[in-house]
Image: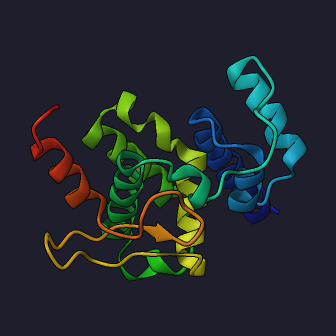
């Protein structure tokens, strides 16, 4: 009996950490195994309002600009750097939190808003399932995310942004 209640405590503790970072209820359910209704109640308790509803954005819908593609690529690099070999196989909830917290520290909370925890979870799952890919640039060596459904070209966003910044303004 004690092991069950200890496991439940761990799941609720993890759900609380995810909800505090405003992860949507569906991914929180997937990561913790707790019922979505319980996660919604926890969300209302923590934030004083109901959680956002609707579909989870795909990588293609999130990558609307080179800057956003670069941010998503940086997040994936942080996650894979911290998670090691296992990072490419499954999403670890605690590693997701650690990676996203570090990502926010690296680029700043305001800059990281476009890749919130729900977007980060979605992008990571699509990368792990092969929907998106992570080639490395032959010019700069940086690895970046591409997907067939994105509005950005399947090339290095870092080189593209560097060229844009280097070109004289008209």
Q: Nearer the viewer, residue 124 or 25?
A: 124
Q: Is residue 90 visible?
A: yes
Say which quarter of the image contains residue 168: top left
Q: Is residue 33 above or below residue 106?
A: below
Residue 46 percent location from the top left of the image: 69, 24
Q: Is residue 46 above or below residue 115?
A: above
Left or right: residue 113 versus residue 143 is: right
Say which quarter of the image contains residue 155: bottom left
User: Of all residues shown, which one is farthest toward the front?
Assistant: 170
User: Of all residues shown, which one is farthest toward the top?
Assistant: 48
Left or right: residue 41 versus residue 73 is: right
Give the quadrant of the N terminus. Answer: bottom right
Q: Nearer the viewer, residue 3 or 165?
A: 165
The mark tally for this picture is 0
Q: How is the image coloured?
A: rainbow
Say which quarter of the image contains residue 59: bottom right
Residue 93 percent location from the top left of the image: 56, 59
Q: Is residue 78 above or below residue 44?
A: below
Residue 156 percent location from the top left of the image: 29, 66
* Image point (58%, 60%), residue name: 60
* Image point (85%, 48%), residue name: 36
Q: Is residue 65 above or below residue 19?
A: below
Residue 2 percent location from the top left of the image: 76, 60
* Image point (17%, 31%), residue name: 170
* Image point (73%, 64%), residue name: 3
Q: Is residue 91 visible?
A: no
């Amino acid at each position: 009996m004690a092991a069950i209640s200890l496991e439940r405590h761990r799941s609720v503790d993890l759900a609380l950490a995810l909800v505090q970072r405003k992860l949507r209820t569906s991914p929180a359910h997937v990561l913790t195994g707790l019922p979505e209704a319980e996660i919604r109640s926890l969300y209302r308790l923590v934030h004083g309002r109901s959680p956002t509803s609707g579909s989870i954005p795909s990588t293609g819908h999130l990558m609307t600009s080179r800057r956003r593609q670069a941010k998503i690529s940086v997040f994936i690099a942080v996650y894979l750097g911290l998670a090691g070999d296992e990072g490419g196989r499954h999403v670890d909830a605690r590693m997701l939190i650690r990676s996203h917290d570090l990502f926010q520290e690296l680029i700043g909370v305001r800059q990281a808003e476009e890749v919130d925890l729900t977007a980060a979870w979605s992008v990571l799952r699509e990368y792990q399932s092969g929907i998106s890919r992570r080639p490395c640039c032959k010019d700069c060596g940086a690895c970046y995310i591409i997907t067939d459904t994105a509005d950005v070209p399947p090339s290095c966003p870092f080189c593209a942004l560097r060229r844009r910044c280097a070109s004289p303004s008209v």
